[in-house]
Amino acid sequence: KIDQMNDNLSDKIDQMNDNLSGKMDVMIDLQKDTLSGQETLIEEVRQSRKEIKGRMDQRFDKLESEVAEMKVALKSKGII
C-alpha cells in the first residue's frame, strides 16, 4: 500500500512538473512577445522624434531668417 501511495505521489509530482513546465513555456513566449512589442514601440518613438526634430529645425531656421529680415527692415527705417 505504501508503494502504491509513493507511485501515486510520484505520478502527481510528475504531472505538476509537466504542467508547470508548460505554463513556464507560455510565460516565456508572452515575455518574448512583450519585449518584441516594446522594441517596435521604441523604434517608432525614435523615428517620430527624428521627424519632429527635423521639422522643428526647419521651422526655427525659417523663423530666424524672418526675424533677421525684420531687423534689416526696421534698421533701414531707423526704427531700431
Image (spheres, rainbow, N blue to C red):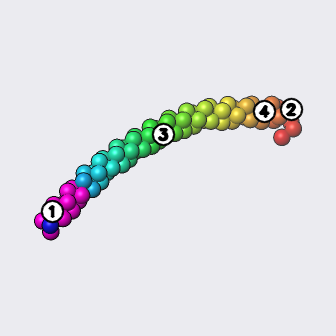
**N-term mark: 4 or 3:** 3
Q: Residues at badges 3 and 1 in contact (C-beta under 8 Å)?
A: no
Q: Of circles 4 and 3, which is in front?
A: 3
The numbered disc on residue 73 is none
Residue type of the residue flagged with mark 1? Gln
**Disc 3 marks which amino acid?**
Leu
**Where does label 1 land, which residue?**
4
Residue holding disc 3: 41
Q: Is residue 61 left or right of residue 34?
A: right
Of marks 2 and 1, which one's residue comes earlier in the chain?
A: 1
Kindly identify the residue that appears in the image at 15 percent across and 68 percent down.
2
Magenta span:
2-14
Q: Separation of disc 3 and disc 2 at Cα?
A: 53 Å
The tag earlier along the polypeptide, 4 or 2, is 4
Q: Tell me, for residue 77, which label it has, or none.
A: 2
Which secondary structure type mostly characterizes the magenta part of the structure? helix
